C-alpha cells in the first residue's frame, strides 16, 4: 500500500510570498485564519520564511488582562493582541426582487461587541405609512430583534443602522422587500496565552500554531 502522507519539513515555518514589504518580527495575517511571524526582511512580491509555531512576545492591548489559556486574537487595525474578537458588518445589499429601489449605499451598520458572526435579514412587514415602513430584524444566529422603522435610527440588541426613505424619483419600500448584511469577526486568531498579562502590560506571550 502506498504511503498516504509523506513528511516534507518540521513545520515550524512556511515559505510565504509577501503582499507588502515585511520586516523581521512583523506579524503576518495568514488568510484571516491564523498569524505568522516574519523571520527575515521580505520585499513586496518576494518569498521568505514565516514562523507558524512557537511562543512569541507580541504587543498587546493595554487595559486588558490575560491569563494562561486565554484565546488571543490579533487586531490588524491597532496592531495588538486582544482576547476579544471584534465583529464588524459588511455592506448592506438589497434583494433583487425588491419593489423599493431606494439608494442604500450610505447605510452604515454598528455592531455590538458581543454579536456573533452571522447573516442579518431585514424585511418590510408593514408599508402602510410610506417613509415609515416597519422592518423585522433577524439574525441567522441570534434570531429576531426588535422591529426597525424607515428613516429612524435603530439601535437593537446586536446591531444598529438607519434605513433611508425613498427620495425623489425612487420607488418606496413595499411589504416583503428585504435587505441583507453579514457580521464577521475582524480579528485574526493568534493562539493561546502562555503567561499572565496584567492590564497595564504592553506585551503578552502567545503560543501560535
Image (cartoon, rainbow, N blue to C red):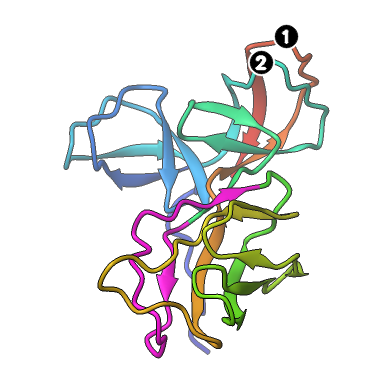
Query: In the rendering, at what x and y percent does residue 111 appear?
Result: 61, 49
- Left or right: where 147 falls relative to 181: right
Task: Classify mark 1: residues with Cα within 10 Å, few (<14), some (14-19) or many (20+).
Answer: few
* 201 vs 126: above or below: above
Cα distance in 3D space between marks 1 and 2: 5 Å
Closer to us: 64 or 174: 174
What residue span does the magenta drawing correspond to? 90-111
Label 2: which secondary element: loop
Residue at coordinates 23% horizontally, 30% vertically from top-left?
Answer: 21
Name the disc covering residue 200, or none. Answer: 1
In the rendered image of this protein, does residue 142 appear above or below residue 55? below
Which secondary structure type mostly characterizes the magenta part of the structure? loop
Q: Tell me if I can see residue 3 in this picture.
A: no
* Few, some or many residues within 10 Å of mark 2 (<14, 14–19, 20+): some
**Discs 1, 2 touching: Cβ within 8 Å:** yes
Write the residue at 50% across / 41% down.
Answer: 35
Q: Nearer the viewer, residue 101 or 47?
A: 101
Q: Secondary structure at mark 1?
A: loop
Residue 61's x, y, as percent?
A: 63, 21
Question: Would you place residue 57 above or below residue 156 in this image?
Answer: above
- Chain-order first, disc 1 or disc 2: 2
Residue 62, label in figure: 2
Q: Is residue 172 left or right of residue 179?
A: left
| Residue 204 x/y as whole percent | 66, 21
Q: In the drawing, what numbered circle is on residue 124?
A: none
Q: Is residue 172 magenta?
A: no
* Res 59 quadrant in image: top right
Residue 26 place in picture, x, y as percent: 40, 26
Amino acid at each position: 500500500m502506498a504511503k498516504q502522507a509523506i513528511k516534507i519539513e518540521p513545520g515550524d515555518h512556511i515559505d510565504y510570498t509577501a503582499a507588502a514589504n515585511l520586516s523581521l518580527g512583523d506579524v503576518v495575517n495568514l488568510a484571516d485564519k491564523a498569524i505568522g511571524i516574519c523571520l527575515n526582511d521580505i520585499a513586496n512580491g518576494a518569498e521568505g520564511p514565516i514562523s507558524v509555531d512557537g511562543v512569541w512576545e507580541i504587543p498587546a492591548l493595554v487595559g486588558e488582562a490575560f491569563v494562561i489559556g486565554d484565546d488571543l486574537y490579533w487586531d490588524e487595525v491597532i496592531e495588538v493582541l486582544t482576547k476579544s474578537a471584534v465583529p464588524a458588518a459588511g455592506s448592506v445589499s438589497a434583494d433583487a426582487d425588491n419593489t423599493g429601489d431606494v439608494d442604500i449605499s450610505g447605510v452604515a451598520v454598528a455592531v455590538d461587541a458581543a454579536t456573533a458572526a452571522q447573516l442579518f435579514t431585514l424585511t418590510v412587514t408593514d408599508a402602510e405609512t410610506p417613509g415609515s415602513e416597519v422592518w423585522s430584524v433577524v439574525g441567522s444566529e441570534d434570531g429576531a430583534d426588535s422591529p426597525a422603522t424607515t428613516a429612524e435610527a435603530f439601535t437593537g440588541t446586536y446591531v444598529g443602522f438607519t434605513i433611508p426613505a425613498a427620495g425623489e424619483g425612487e420607488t418606496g419600500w413595499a411589504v416583503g422587500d428585504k435587505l441583507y448584511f453579514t457580521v464577521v469577526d475582524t480579528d485574526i486568531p493568534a493562539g493561546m496565552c502562555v503567561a499572565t498579562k496584567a492590564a497595564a502590560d504592553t506585551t503578552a506571550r502567545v503560543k501560535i500554531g
